[in-house]
Amino acid sequence: MIRRFFSILFLCLSFGFAEAQTSSLYLSYCDGKLAETGASRMGVDVTISAAVGFPAATLAQYSGARLTTLRIGLCTTNSDMSDMTAWVRNSLTGDIVAEVNMEDFTTGWNEVTLEAPITIDGTNDLYLGFSYRQTRSVKCLSFVGETNPMGAWIGRDGSWEDYSTRDMGSLSIEGIIEGEGLPQFDLNVLDMKLLSGEIVREKSLPYEATVKNVASQPISGLLIDYSLGDGAKTGQISIDQTLNPREEVTVTWEVPTKDVPAGTCIPADITVLLPDGSADEDMTNNSYHFDYATYEAGTDFEHIALFEEFTTEKCVNCPSATQRIEAALEKGYFDKVILATHHAGYYTDWLTIEADREYCWFYNDGGATYAPASMLDRTLTGMDKDFSPVFNPPQSAKLCERFDIALERPALVGLNTSLQYDKDSRRVTISVEGQRLDAFEHQCQEPRITVFALIDSIQAKDQTGAGEGYYHRHVTRAVLTDVWGDVLKWDDDNTFSNIYTWIIPEEYREEKFEAVAFVSNYDANDPTNCCIFNSSYSELGSQLVAAIETIHDDNSKTSTYFNLMGQRCDDHSHGFIVIDGKLILR
């Protein structure tokens, strides 16, 4: 994702004078960083240029200061490069304002002093760049960090291209400005997160923020100013943290919510301040607004996680991955984690259905896919890529750790599935019932219900990496809803009830049928925002066995009663009750 923002980063170079203080700052998008591996612009016997731009509106606050130095970062240099110059322009194709020949350029940072400083007037853009002649392509260009829309211009023989659209980062090009009256104290909150937006009433709100000192003086300590519930509760929290100029840190804290009225959309305003009396000279980047929701302790539902595996018969490593997954499930997770497999990711095979192909969207890697691969509740794990919920199944012990993390997330929606089967027509009817807490509406903006029809233990035809007698487990054979789920329609009492049917094909053993239902968020533009919040599972095999075992005198039959949370109750209970596997509203 391209984060579009401007940053002015400061260097602590201060000189004492009787009346004024001269400071130096960096104009930079790269934060002084250099890439380990360089990029190149293809071409033989051509002139290559690279530049970053700073708009006049950003520079206006530094009117009167002087641009004195350019810093050019190169990942490598060799004899294919010559005629290197550093320059300053007011536009990419405009006249050169200043230019310096770089006769002794080298790998790393090259600091170039301008022959005459350029005074910033606040009315012109500034483009800082360099050019060189190459006899063949050289991977000297350094792209690092976040991509800025003006931080990645590459030219060849005077023709420019905006590389920010490629999301490679920003170029390692910097300028140094000197002057009196430049900002001394400026704390920039780069990012702030409310780690859990749904909490038990009167529990604390957990926050995490990345902050940076972008001025010329050290900062000693932070002060978190908060206001909850439109001023119902206010306060401040001190954090012992020192930041030197250009230093960036991540801090965490908790905001108490005691005495704040409960609700499903409670405003929380957070501002990070300087505590020692020094005034932050730019408060526009210090505050964030959040909304959070509360629920009563003990009212959340049991969380059942869904583990989806990508596999095919052409995948040589998939059988061993399946063994690792089953070894993890055997450590007490069979009743807590549901397994469903999609035959896609590494080519396809005879069990692949169209939904399997569509779910490869979750890889979100420019069309690149692989197997074995997996998703756990379609949620980012925090241990893998930040752009996809898909990960390579680890060893069973590590997988159990991931199970525990997933299951710790409170479930604010509960599900129950039940089956009815007509043996003559092989039609199975799946009843899916659900209930939500009020806080779930805050947690999930676009709730969808998805139902899978699975068949377990399908004998493989030609599984690479396994011998004869290999069986595929929990194979998705149909999606009984839209592939991305049906829109959930809630009744006035925060419940829903849906019915789905499927005819089990003759080639499958009926007792191997399984139904999986889950509630997830829908976001057509972001694979990391389609999290599953709870799941439910029902299998036909155990129901058929139970039916055979309970054929006896009706007078001796004892019914069983459960609520939607899976808790046993008595025959006097009201609401949605599961009686002998059938959902009844009493």
Image (cartoon, rainbow, N blue to C red):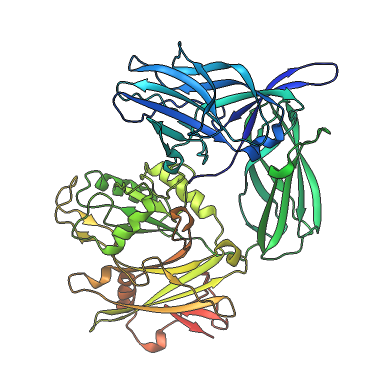
Tell me if residue 255 comes above or below residue 202 in the rendering. Answer: above
Residue 408, given in percent of the width and then of the height, sits at 54, 53
Tell me if residue 520 comes above or below residue 467 in the rendering. Answer: below
Residue plotted at (41% across, 41% down): 166
Residue closest to the eye, 397 or 451: 451
Tell me if residue 563 comes above or below residue 298 in the rendering. Answer: below
The quarter of the picture where the C terminus appears is: bottom right
Residue 153, given in percent of the width and then of the height, sits at 46, 35
In this orientation, does residue 580 appear? Answer: no
Snapshot quadrant of residue 397: top left
Residue plotted at (67% across, 62% down): 294
In the image, is 372 to the left or to the right of 377? left
From this viewpoint, which residue is outermost toward the front? 95
Tell me if residue 560 comes above or below residue 264 in the rendering. Answer: below
Residue closest to the eye, 269 or 165: 165
From this viewpoint, which residue is outermost toward the top? 104
Residue plotted at (34% across, 74% down): 543
Residue closest to the eye, 196 or 183: 183
Residue 180, given in percent of the width and then of the height, sits at 76, 24
In this orientation, does residue 198 appear? Answer: yes
Q: How many marks?
A: 0
In the image, is 127 to the left or to the right of 263? left
Residue 271, given in percent of the width and then of the height, sits at 73, 46
In the image, is 131 to the left or to the right of 63? left
In the image, is 215 to the left or to the right of 564? right
Residue closest to the eye, 97 or 246: 97
Snapshot quadrant of residue 133: top left
